């Protein structure tokens, strides 16, 4: 193995040079779940002239937010960056990854570490639909405040990151089903991003996600064999 290394920017952008994919992202004739899951790829080349309407982005986000979350607190928050000047401002923060500016939008998935404060609002809606008695609702809300309100910030951030990862995956699958492409990104300066875009301090940054019309399909998937990642019942000592 060589001892050569690359800067973070070189590392994140080198993939485009070594990607020999020729075909465009596949247009799906069948959008059943297994087809969508199999055909989704991380796409880094986008048509910069293609724009997705905000209403359609909102529809994708509505589908994404049907994902499960810890205690149904829905800690995810979204900052949708679709203005070209704002994307240009984000570009150096994200190590000059070209998909930042070429994609129709960059969706910053954030996690609200204080999401539990909306417990009453959320569970009141459940009770109003007749899916939970009022007294049980009150016990649920009180328990959530007692528990989450006493969690250390690190645990609240971890919960928000788990919820954010789940909703991010659902968003990517929804986008593929609608004929769009995505790539999740963790290669950016989180502290600088939070400051530059005036993100509330109770939010943590989970990922950036480009959304647009891909021009190259991206790498074919290669995965470790199941026997390398699956163990049944328990690990033997």
Image: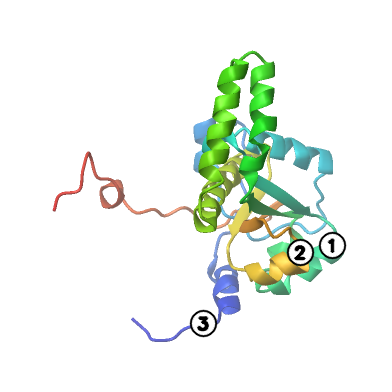
- Residue 94 screen position, x and y as percent: 67, 69
Please indicate, yes or no, whether residue 36 appears anywhere in the rendered image. Answer: no
The mark nearer the N terminus, 3 or 2, is 3
- Image quadrant of residue 169? top right
Q: Secondary structure at mark 2?
A: helix
Q: Which residue is mark 1?
A: 84
Up/down of 51 relative to 188, above or below: above
Q: Specify the farthest residue to the bottom.
A: 3
User: Disc 3 versus disc 2: distance between alpha carbons?
Assistant: 23 Å
- Residue 90 screen position, x and y as percent: 75, 68
Q: Specify the farthest residue to the top.
A: 130
Q: Which residue is mark 2?
A: 101
User: Disc 2 versus disc 1: distance between alpha carbons?
Assistant: 7 Å
> Residue placed at 55% from the left, 69% from the top?
15
State the residue in front, 48 or 121. Answer: 121
Tell me how many marks there are: 3
Q: Secondary structure at mark 3?
A: loop
Q: Is residue 231 left or right of residue 208?
A: left
Q: Count residues near mark 3 (Cα–Cα under 10 Å), then give few for <14, some for 14-19, many for 20+.
A: few
The quadrant of the rendering that contains the N terminus is: bottom left
> Residue placed at 68% from the left, 24% from the top?
124
User: Disc 3 versus disc 1: distance between alpha carbons?
Assistant: 29 Å
Q: Does the CB distance between marks 3 and 1 fall below 8 Å?
A: no
Q: Does the CB distance between marks 2 and 1 fall below 8 Å?
A: yes
Q: Count residues near mark 2 (Cα–Cα under 10 Å), then give few for <14, some for 14-19, many for 20+.
A: many
Q: Which residue is mark 3?
A: 6
- Residue 48 screen position, x and y as percent: 79, 59
Q: Secondary structure at mark 1?
A: helix
> Residue placed at 70% from the left, 67% from the top?
193
- Residue 64 screen position, x and y as percent: 64, 38
């Amino acid at each position: 193995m060589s001892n050569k290394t690359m800067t973070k920017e070189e590392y994140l952008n080198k993939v485009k040079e070594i990607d020999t994919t020729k075909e465009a992202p596949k247009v799906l004739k069948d959008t059943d779940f297994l087809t969508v899951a199999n055909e989704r790829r991380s796409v880094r080349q986008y048509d910069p002239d293609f724009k997705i309407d905000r209403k359609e982005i909102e529809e994708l986000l509505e589908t994404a937010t049907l994902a499960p979350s810890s205690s149904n607190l829905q800690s995810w928050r979204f900052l949708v960056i679709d203005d070209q000047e704002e994307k240009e401002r984000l570009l150096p923060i994200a190590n000059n990854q070209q998909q930042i500016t070429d994609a129709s939008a960059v969706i910053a998935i954030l996690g609200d570490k204080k999401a539990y404060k909306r417990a009453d609002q959320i569970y009141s809606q459940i009770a109003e639909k007749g899916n939970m008695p009022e007294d049980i609702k009150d016990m649920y809300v009180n328990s959530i405040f007692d528990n989450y309100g006493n969690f250390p910030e690190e645990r609240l951030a971890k919960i928000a990151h788990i919820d954010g990862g789940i909703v991010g995956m659902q968003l990517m699958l929804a986008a593929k089903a609608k004929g769009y492409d995505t790539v999740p990104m963790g290669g950016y300066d989180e502290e600088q991003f939070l400051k530059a875009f005036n993100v509330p301090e109770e939010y943590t940054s989970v990922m950036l996600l480009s959304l647009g019309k891909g021009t190259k399909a991206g790498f074919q998937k290669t995965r470790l064999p199941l026997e390398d990642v699956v163990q049944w019942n328990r690990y033997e000592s």
